[in-house]
Amino acid sequence: MKFRKVQWLLLILALGGLLFVTACDTPTRYKLLTTFFDGVPPLGSATNVAPVAVPDSTPNQVAASPPKPPPEGTFTVHPPFQQHQCAECHQSSSGMGLKLQPPELCWNCHKDFLAGQKVKHQPVESGDCASCHDPHQSENKNLLLQKGNALCLTCHDDPLENFKFKHQAVESGDCLDCHTPHATNFKSLLKQSVKDTCDDCHDDLTKKKDVHEPVGDGDCLACHEAHASNKKYLLKKTVPELCWVCHDNFLEKAKFQHDVVEDCTSCHDPHQSAEGALLKKNIFQLCGDCHDDKDLKADKGHAGFEGKSCTTCHDPHVGTDMNLLKPSAKPK
Ligand code: HEC
Ligand code: HEC
Ligand code: HEC
Ligand code: HEC
Ligand code: HEC
Ligand code: HEC
Ligand code: HEC
Ligand code: HEC
Ligand code: HEC
Ligand code: HEC
Ligand code: HEC
C-alpha cells in the first residue's frame, strides 16, 4: 500500500512538473510531453506550437525520438533542467556546449563527494557522470540510466556467472547493499569495513571465548569469496587446503594419520568456540562422538587413564604409530 501511495505522489508531482514546463521553450516541453503521452505531434507539425529559436542540435534530435510510453512512478527531473536553467550548464551563446566539464560542472551545485576519499570509482573520478546519470531527466530514481544492478552490469561482468555457489546477498540483493557508487574510504568501494559489511546480515562470530585470529581481525575474505565460488560455503579453497594457506601442513610428513583428520571441521569450528583450540565440543564429547567404551577398555591401553584428557596421550592429528600416541604415552 505504501509503495502505491508513493507512486501516486510521484505521478502528481510529475504532472505538476508538466504544467510548469508548459512555460518552457518548445523542445523542452516537447521532450517532456512525449515522455508522458503518446501521440504528441512532431515538432514543427503542430500548429499551436510557436516557432522558437533554439540551438540547432536540439529540435532535430528531439523530433527524431519516438514518443515513449508513460514512465514508471520513479520518474525524476533534474531541478535545474525542470526550471529551465539551461544556462547553468550550457553555454547559451555557442550551441549546447557545456560551460564546464563534469565533474566540475556538477560541483557548482553539489558538494564535491570525491574530495578527501581514498577510493574513487573510476568513471566518477574521470567525470563520466553521464555514464550512469541522465543530466536532464530519467524514468528511474536519482536520474539513473538503468534500474538496480542492471546499471552496474552495463560495465561489469556478472559476478555470479559460471559459479556453482552464489551468495544470496548478491543473487537476490542489491550491489549497493555493500558498495557505494561514487567514493569511499574502504577498499573495493565498500560502504564500510569488510567485517561491518558482513556483520550487517550475519551473526557476530567473535562472541565466544576462543576466536580464530583471522576472524577476530575481521578478515572474512581470507577464507570466503564475497560474491560466488565453486566451493561450498563460498570458500576460496576446500578444507584442508584452505587451512594450509596459514598453517604448516602437518599431514605431509605424517607416518600415520587419524582417519578423519582431513575433515578439519568435524572437530574445529572455523570461527569461534567456547572450548580451547576452536574445538566444537568438550574433548570427551568430541572424541566420544566417534569412539565408544569399546575403544576405551583397559586391555586397549586405557587401564587407569581415569578421565585424563584424550590428548594427554594421543595426538588428535597424526602419529608415528597407528594409535597416534604422543612420545610420552608410548608403552616402554
Ligand atoms: C545540470 C546541468 C544541465 C542542465 C541544467 C541542462 N543540461 Fe543539457 N546537458 C547536460 C550535459 C552534462 C549534457 C551532455 C550529456 C552527455 O554527455 O551525454 C547535456 C546535453 C544536452 C543536449 C545534447 C543531447 C542530449 O540530450 O544528450 C541537449 C540538446 C541539451 N543538453 C539541452 C538542454 C536544455 C534545452 C536544457 C534546459 C531545459 C538543458 N540541456 C539543461 C547538462 C545539463
Ligand atoms: C557508476 C555509476 C555512477 C556514476 C559514474 C556516477 N553516479 Fe551518481 N549515483 C549513482 C547511483 C547508483 C546513485 C544512487 C545511490 C543510492 O541509491 O544510494 C547515485 C546518486 C547520485 C546523487 C544523489 C544522491 C547522492 O548521493 O547525493 C548525486 C547528486 C549524484 N549521484 C551525482 C553524481 C555526479 C556529480 C557524478 C559525476 C561526478 C556521478 N554521480 C557519477 C551512480 C553513479
Ligand atoms: C544548477 C545547479 C545544479 C547543477 C549544475 C547540477 N545539479 Fe544535480 N541537482 C541540483 C538540485 C537543486 C537537485 C535536487 C536537490 C538535491 O538532491 O540536492 C539536484 C539533484 C541531483 C540528483 C538527484 C536526483 C534525485 O532524484 O534526487 C542527481 C543524481 C544529480 N543532481 C546529478 C547531477 C550531475 C551528474 C550534475 C553534473 C552533470 C549535476 N547534478 C549538476 C542542482 C544541480
Ligand atoms: C560506466 C562503466 C561503469 C559502471 C556503470 C559501473 N562501473 Fe564499477 N568500475 C568501472 C571501472 C572502469 C572500474 C575500474 C576498473 C576495474 O576495476 O574493473 C570499476 C571498478 C569498480 C569496483 C572496484 C573498485 C576498487 O577500487 O577495487 C567496484 C567494487 C565497482 N566498480 C562496483 C560497481 C558498482 C556497484 C556499480 C553499479 C552501481 C558499478 N561499479 C558500475 C566502470 C563502471
Ligand atoms: C554482500 C556484499 C556485496 C554485494 C551485495 C556485492 N558485492 Fe561486490 N564486493 C564485495 C566485497 C566484500 C568485495 C571485495 C572482494 C575482495 O577484496 O576479495 C567486492 C568486490 C567487488 C568488485 C572488485 C573486485 C572484483 O571482484 O572484481 C567489483 C567490481 C564488485 N564487487 C562488483 C559488484 C557488483 C556489480 C555487485 C552487484 C551485482 C556486487 N559487487 C555486489 C561485496 C559485495
Ligand atoms: C545484505 C545481507 C548480507 C550481507 C551484507 C552479507 N551476507 Fe552472507 N549471506 C546472506 C544471506 C541472506 C545468506 C543465505 C542465508 C544463510 O545461509 O544465512 C548468506 C550466506 C552466506 C554464506 C553461506 C553460503 C552457503 O553456501 O551456505 C557465507 C559464507 C556468507 N554469507 C558470507 C558472507 C561474508 C563473508 C560477508 C561479508 C563480505 C557477507 N556474507 C555479507 C546475506 C548477507
Ligand atoms: C579461517 C577461515 C575462515 C574465516 C577467516 C572465516 N570463515 Fe566463515 N567459514 C569457514 C569455513 C571453513 C566454513 C564452513 C564450515 C563448515 O564446513 O561447517 C565457514 C562457514 C561460514 C558460514 C556459513 C555456515 C555458518 O557457520 O553459518 C558463514 C555465514 C560464514 N562462514 C561467515 C563468515 C564471516 C562473516 C566471517 C568474518 C567475520 C568468516 N566467515 C570468516 C572459514 C572461515
Ligand atoms: C588466514 C590465515 C588462516 C587460515 C586460512 C586458517 N588459520 Fe587457523 N590460525 C591462524 C592464526 C594466525 C592462528 C593463531 C596463531 C597460531 O596459533 O598459529 C590460528 C590458530 C588456529 C588454531 C588454534 C586456535 C587456538 O585457540 O588455540 C586452530 C585450531 C586453527 N587455527 C585451525 C584452523 C583450521 C582448521 C583452518 C582451516 C579450516 C585454519 N585454521 C585456517 C590463521 C589461519
Ligand atoms: C579428530 C578431531 C580433530 C580433527 C579432525 C582435526 N583436529 Fe586440529 N586439533 C584437535 C584437538 C583435540 C586439538 C587440541 C590439541 C591439544 O590440545 O593438544 C587440535 C589442535 C589444532 C591446532 C592448534 C595447534 C596444535 O597443533 O596444537 C591446529 C592449528 C589444528 N588443530 C589444525 C587442524 C587442521 C588444519 C585440521 C585439518 C587438517 C585439524 N586440525 C583436524 C582435533 C582435531
Ligand atoms: C568424526 C569421527 C571421529 C572423531 C570425532 C574422532 N575420531 Fe578417532 N578415529 C575415527 C575413525 C573413523 C578412526 C579409524 C579407526 C576406527 O574406525 O576406529 C579413528 C581412529 C582413532 C585412533 C587410532 C586407532 C585406530 O584403530 O586406528 C585413535 C587413537 C583415535 N581415533 C583417537 C581419537 C581421539 C583422541 C579423538 C578426540 C580428539 C578422536 N579420535 C576423535 C573417527 C573419529
Ligand atoms: C593414559 C594415556 C591414554 C589416555 C588418557 C587415552 N588413551 Fe587411548 N590409548 C592409549 C594407549 C597406550 C593405546 C594403545 C593401546 C595398544 O597398544 O593397543 C590407546 C588406544 C586408543 C584407541 C585405539 C583402540 C583400538 O581399538 O585399538 C582409541 C580409539 C583410543 N585410544 C581413544 C582414546 C580416547 C577417545 C581417549 C579419551 C577419552 C583416550 N584414548 C585416552 C592411551 C591413552
Image (spheres, rainbow, N blue to C red):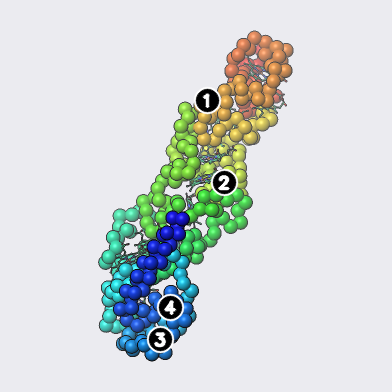
The CA span between labels 4 and 1 is 69 Å
Instruction: Write down the residue under mark 4.
Output: 34
Q: Are marks 2 and 1 in contact (CB under 8 Å)?
A: no
> Label 3 is placed on what type of residue?
Leu
Using the rendered image of the protein, determine whether residue 321 is visible from the camera's viewpoint.
Answer: no
Mark earlier in primary sequence (4, 3): 4
Instruction: Tell me where residue 284 sits by quadrant.
Output: top right
Q: Residues within 10 Å of mark 3 (few under 14, many from 20)?
A: some
The CA span between labels 3 and 2 is 56 Å
Instruction: Write down the residue under mark 2.
Output: 234
Image location (x, y in percent) of residue 178: 45, 51
The CA span between labels 4 and 3 is 11 Å
> Label 2 is placed on what type of residue?
Leu
Using the rendered image of the protein, determine whether residue 23 is visible from the camera's viewpoint.
Answer: yes
Q: Give whichever of 58, 162 is nearer the camera.
A: 58
Image location (x, y in percent) of residue 10: 39, 64
> Which numbered disc, 3 or 2, marks the residue closer to the eye?
3
The CA span between labels 1 and 3 is 78 Å
Q: Give whichever of 288, 118 is nearer the camera.
A: 288
Secondary structure type for disc 2: helix
